[in-house]
Amino acid sequence: MTSGIRHLIFFVLIIGLAYAAYAYMIKPANTHLDQERTAMEQKRAKLDELERATAAADDLTAQLHKVEEAIAVFESKLPPSSEIHTVLENVTLIAQRHGLTPKTIRTMKAVENRGYIEQPLRMELHGDFHAYYAFLLELEKLDRITKIRELKLKKKSQTEGQTESEFVMSIFFQKSPA
């Protein structure tokens, strides 16, 4: 064998060995590496999603604490149902202090809701419009939660500046524990 043929055989063997190494070692290793890289990217995306969910949960926890504080403040403004006469007396005193004359005060059917009771009162007041306005402003400043609805305000035709009003005022109370 001549040296040229040996070189050719050696070159063919080297090329065959390089092809075999690529086909049986490098190509499977690259495929495995791509699969691992894809799996790692999926895990990283899930981790990012988990971090966002954790941040949202922290925000929800903070919001829950704020809501609990608001409920505590709301409940502190709800007197027990045994104090309805005190609140009613305060409203009457405020009306009289501003020169309004309470004509009628009638309790209506109480409405029970989750955690509180709404006691509507139908009231009729007579007096000066400015006094009535001052009464509403002071009523708004009460520590107790009240709501005025079905307001009818009429001018008295006999005297200037005098009004008569009829409205339903709701007073809210804590529901007594059963």
Image: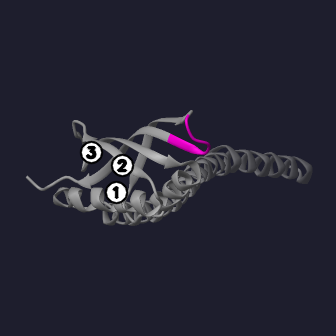
Name the amino acid, label 2: Pro
**SS at badge 2:** strand
Secondary structure category for the residue under label 1: helix
How many discs appear?
3
Which residue is at the front of the view, 118 or 14? 118
**Residue at 40% from the left image edge and 50% from the top image edge:** 101
Measuring from the top left, give residue 19's x and y in whole percent.
73, 45
Q: Earlier in the sequence, mark 1 or mark 3?
A: 1
Q: Which mark is residue 102?
A: 2
Q: Amino acid at mark 1?
A: Thr
Q: Nearer the viewer, mark 2 or mark 3?
A: 2
Q: Is mark 2 in CB contact (under 8 Å) with mark 1?
A: yes
Q: Which residue is mark 3?
A: 119
Along the line of sight, which residue is nearer the eye, 1 or 83?
83
x and y percentages locating residue 38 in the rendered image: 61, 48
Residue 22 falls inside the magenta stretch: no
Specify start and end residues of the magenta stretch as a single range. 158-163
SS assignment for the magenta stretch, majority: loop
Residue drawn at point x = 48 percent, y = 58 percent: 140
Q: Which mark is residue 92?
A: 1
Q: Secondary structure at mark 3?
A: strand
Q: Residues within 10 Å of mark 2 (few under 14, many from 20)?
A: some
